[in-house]
């Protein structure tokens, strides 16, 4: 199974704060071997300029993390920017804290189901990125299940994060399969134990069951595979390179 691996720019967020830094960072990512990216953690830059820089390095922007307020206050602008970027998935990085209860999940689902449907009418889709807290039960039901059940499977997608699913006590492969048709993008992130604590690490350097995860991704028809590491001892670009090389050795890219 060979897939194209992408880089989640949040990994190198300290290196993408200006247009010049973005240009240099994109050059480095292309040199490593990445061909797609997720726009996240960037400094201020117009969509047209970002799209031009990406094109100049042969990179495609396939997903964003867009602030909550832009979805609720400037949806027309979000739609316009994603069309300029040539990016079909408008994502959110996480559930705002006030929503993290039974009533909140339902309220968020109602609000963003409408937003997702409007994106759908404009040729786009919404994608929700999970952490571990969605695996807490509220009234006997997981927060993530509330979002799944109360939104439109045609327009409301999920960016499953392998590390955070595992951190929530769940099985990444099972959840990828459960959400078949609603997982167009996935965050590849490994988990290890350092000093008796869970820690993020490079792909195939930790304890997640990658062969099974990749089989599940294939079955679920995942389109975009985005390597990410939020924090860790290895320098960010070195981390992305290690993950890429490990994926390459495994025949994944």
Image (cartoon, helix red, strand yellow):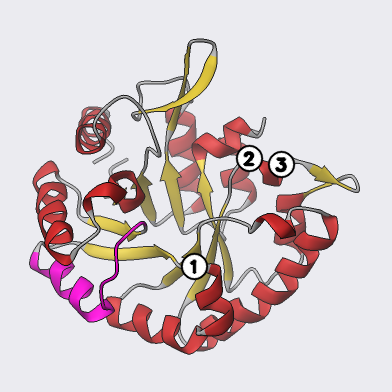
Say which label, 3 or 1, has the lower sequence index: 1
Indicate left or right for 217 with 111 as reference: left
Residue occupied by mark 1: 67
Residue occupied by mark 2: 132
- Of the 4 image quadrants, the one containing the C terminus is top left
Indicate left or right for 67 with 95 as reference: left
Asked if the stretch drawn in magenta spans residue 44, the answer is yes
Q: Secondary structure at mark 1?
A: loop
Residue 63 occupies which quadrant of the picture? bottom left
Q: Residues within 10 Å of mark 1 (few under 14, many from 20)?
A: some
- Of the 4 image quadrants, the one containing the N terminus is top left
Q: Nearest the camera: 215 or 101?
A: 101
In the displayed structure, 243 sits above or below 59; it is above
Residue occupied by mark 3: 135
Asked if the stretch drawn in magenta spans residue 253, the answer is no
Does the CB distance between marks 3 and 2 fall below 8 Å? yes
Region in magenta: 41-56
* Most common secondary structure along the magenta stretch: helix
Percent from the top left, x then y, of residue 65? 44, 62
Q: CA distance from mark 3 to mark 2?
A: 6 Å
Q: CA distance from mark 2 to mark 1?
A: 20 Å
Which residue is at a point 38% across and 87% down the rendered structure image? 80
């Amino acid at each position: 199974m060979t897939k194209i691996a992408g880089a989640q720019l949040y990994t190198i967020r300290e290196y993408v704060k200006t247009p010049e830094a973005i240009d240099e960072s994109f050059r480095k990512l292309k040199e490593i071997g990445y061909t797609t990216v997720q726009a996240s953690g960037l400094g201020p830059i117009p969509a047209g300029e970002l799209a031009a820089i990406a094109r100049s390095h042969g990179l495609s922007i396939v997903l964003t993390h867009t602030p909550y307020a832009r979805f609720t206050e400037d949806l027309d602008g979000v739609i316009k920017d994603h069309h300029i970027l040539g990016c079909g998935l408008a994502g959110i990085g996480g559930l705002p804290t006030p929503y993290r209860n039974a009533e909140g999940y339902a309220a968020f689902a109602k609000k963003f189901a409408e937003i997702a449907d409007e994106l759908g009418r404009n040729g786009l889709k919404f994608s929700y990125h999970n952490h571990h807290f969605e695996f807490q039960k509220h009234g006997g039901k997981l927060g993530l299940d509330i979002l799944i059940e109360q939104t439109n499977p045609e327009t409301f997608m999920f960016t499953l994060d392998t590390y955070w699913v595992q951190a929530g006590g769940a099985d990444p492969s099972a959840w990828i399969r459960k959400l078949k048709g609603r997982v167009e993008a996935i965050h590849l992130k490994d988990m290890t134990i350092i000093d008796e604590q869970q820690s993020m690490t490079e792909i195939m350097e930790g304890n997640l069951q990658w062969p099974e995860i990749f089989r599940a991704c294939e079955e679920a028809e995942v389109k975009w595979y985005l390597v990410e590491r939020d924090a860790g001892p290895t320098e960010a670009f070195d981390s992305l390179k290690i993950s890429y090389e490990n994926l390459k050795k495994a025949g994944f890219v």
